[in-house]
Amino acid sequence: MTVECRKAQMVDVEALFEIIQGYAEKGIMLPRSKEMLHHQLDMFVIAEVDGHMVGCGSLCQLGKDLVEIRSLGISEGYKGQGIGKKLVSYLIDEARALHIPKIMALTYEVAFFEKNGFTVVPKEIFPEKVWKDCVHCKKQHCCDEIAVLKRLD
């Protein structure tokens, strides 16, 4: 199986929406509308196997020295095959190209991120995230996600 990662394109919006919606329906990822995906498409990367999208992720700049990995998801039947690792590696390379020294995520998959060089940190150290996204989340006052951070400098 060959996995290719690339920047998302307009033709990917429907498949991106489907992957993200699957996670959102389980309450483990914030939903993204198709309109929002069109608007933020340049932030997304996708993973393909044999020309079919099987995973996605995005980077969101939270400050001049911090980006967040978000909307990281793998289609059912493709989990546990290294696709998430390839997506995270691609996103880390993107952050490095932007000269951003810190990359974070809020996750339920702590072990996955730890295997990729992230460490658990208190989410309170990210006021940028709280004011950008958390204020709109229904779990704002009872968030059970774990914050992870990787320094790239």
Image (cartoon, rainbow, N blue to C red):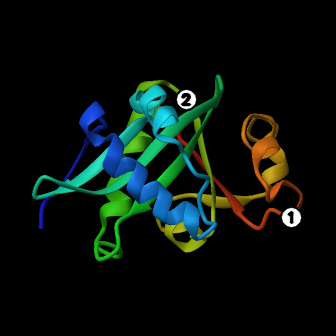
Q: Residue at x 57, y 58 (%)?
A: 118
Q: Mark 1 points at which residue?
A: 142
Disc 1, SS: helix
Residue 52 percent location from the top left of the image:
18, 56
Q: Mark 2 points at which residue?
A: 100
Residue reaching furthest to the right: 141
Describe residue 47's horizontal placement relative to residue 121 as left or right.
left
Above or below: residue 127 compared with residue 54: above
Depth check: give the residue in front, 41 or 98. 41
Q: Which residue is drawn at 49% across and 58% down?
A: 21
Q: Which of marks 1 and 2 is nearer the N terminus?
A: 2
Describe residue 11's horizontal placement relative to residue 144 as left or right.
left
Residue 37 percent location from the top left of the image:
46, 36
Describe residue 44's horizontal placement relative to residue 30 as left or right.
left
Assign the N terminus to one quadrant of the image.
bottom left
The amino acid type of the residue labelled 1 equals Cys
Assign the C terminus to one quadrant of the image.
top right
Q: Residue at x 51, y 51 (%)?
A: 71
- What crowding class fits label 2: few (fewer than 14 Cα within 10 Å), some (14-19), or many (20 or more)? some
The amino acid type of the residue labelled 2 equals Ile
Residue 59 percent location from the top left of the image:
50, 38
